[in-house]
Image (tube, helix red, strand yellow):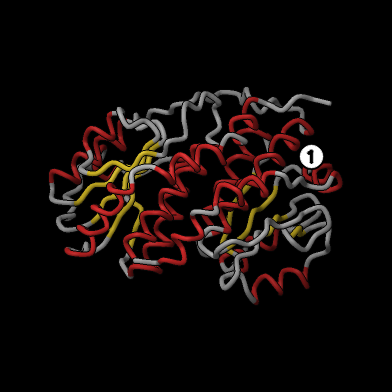
Amino acid sequence: MTAPSHMLQEALEAPARLETLLAADAGLYAALATQLSAAPPKFAFTIARGTSNHAASFAASLIQRHLGRITASLAPSLWTRARAELEVEGALALAISQSGSGPDVVETTAMARDRGARTVAIVNDAGSPLAAVAEHVLPCHAGEETGIAATKTMLATLVVVARLVARWAGDEGLEAALGRMPDAVRRAQSLRWGPALVAHLAEAPACFVISRGPNLAIAQEIALKLQELAGLPALAFSSAEFQHGPKALLSRQHPALLLPAAGWVGAEADRLWDEAQPAQLACIGTTPGLEAPEPLHPDLDPILGLAAFHPALDALARARGHDPDRPPKLSKVTRTL
């Protein structure tokens, strides 16, 4: 039997790391939530790149739904390249970076703080440059991650986001569910994709990953990981947006992986299912060989879906002849300006 990749070994550390995360920093979350409730931000914006930008998309979905604050993604280049006169006073700036070292994210966060935004950094390295420039720091406690692909750090980042929103919104149900996350992630990681699906994707020249709501961020992350580790060109779409043109490309050569999302993926997914042959559309929880993780909470189930994907990614990368520990042309920290 082939030994698990280093990538997968690090991913499987996530449950233990989440236990540490959830036991730490209660005072940080309480103090920040008190400030945000006492002086609610006019709006919120995120500052992130790559995998962290997918976590930011997840954060935006939760903040808008639970707190009613419009949340947008701010492209760092609007400041680092264009020097746009951005009016951010009174806003919440949520900067996300596992390494905390990306120059453009650091510089943009410093600008936001200088211009009167309340800055919060979610980082795995509490001693990073990003942590140094932010007003508030929420550590991920994921431990050192040396694999190029962000796995346990991404899962931890998503849990930090959910924990912040739960405390800010005073959502006791979400907070209680977070306490059960480590065991839920362990169960999700025990799932495996069926060999027929792995074989199909191993031969596909490209694919789609489709979802909606907070699960769209997970679809984006899965698509990125398929590209960088399995060498599979993959595009993520909202199940609604997919109807506006991209579905014309759906075929056995360009299959789609559908991530269900309770309350979000509705009639448009039903239409896709009716229109597509089973070989073209695989739905987690419905298609044989695609078992869904046991539901925990609507806001946390997307995280469990990503946890279940990491073992499948290891198998698919190998089936496509790729080493998940050595993706070509990539390094652990990407520095952009």
206 to the left or right of 48: right
Residue 336 can be seen in this image: no
Depth order, front residue of 80/311: 311
Residue at 47% of width from left, 49% of height from top?
158
Q: Position of residue 216 (x, y in %)?
A: 54, 58
- Above or below, 174 against 202 in this view is below
Depth order, front residue of 122/260: 122
- Residue type at the position of mark 1: Ala
Q: Position of residue 316 (x, y in %)?
A: 74, 37
Give residue 286's quadrant in the image. Answer: bottom right
Q: Which residue is mark 1?
A: 202
100 to the left or right of 319: left
How crowded pointer 1 is (Cα within 10 Å; few <14, some 14-19, many 20+) is rated as many
- Residue that protrudes farthest toward the bottom in the picture: 267
Depth order, front residue of 94/244: 94
- Above or below, 148 against 210 in this view is above
Q: Secondary structure at mark 1?
A: helix
Q: Quadrant of the N terminus?
A: top right
Q: Position of residue 307 (x, y in %)?
A: 61, 46
Q: Position of residue 148 (x, y in %)?
A: 54, 27
Residue at 23% of width from left, 40% of height from top?
134
258 to the left or right of 56: right
Residue 2 can be seen in this image: yes
Q: Quadrant of the C terminus?
A: top left
Depth order, front residue of 2/243: 2
Residue at 76% of width from left, 58% of height from top?
282
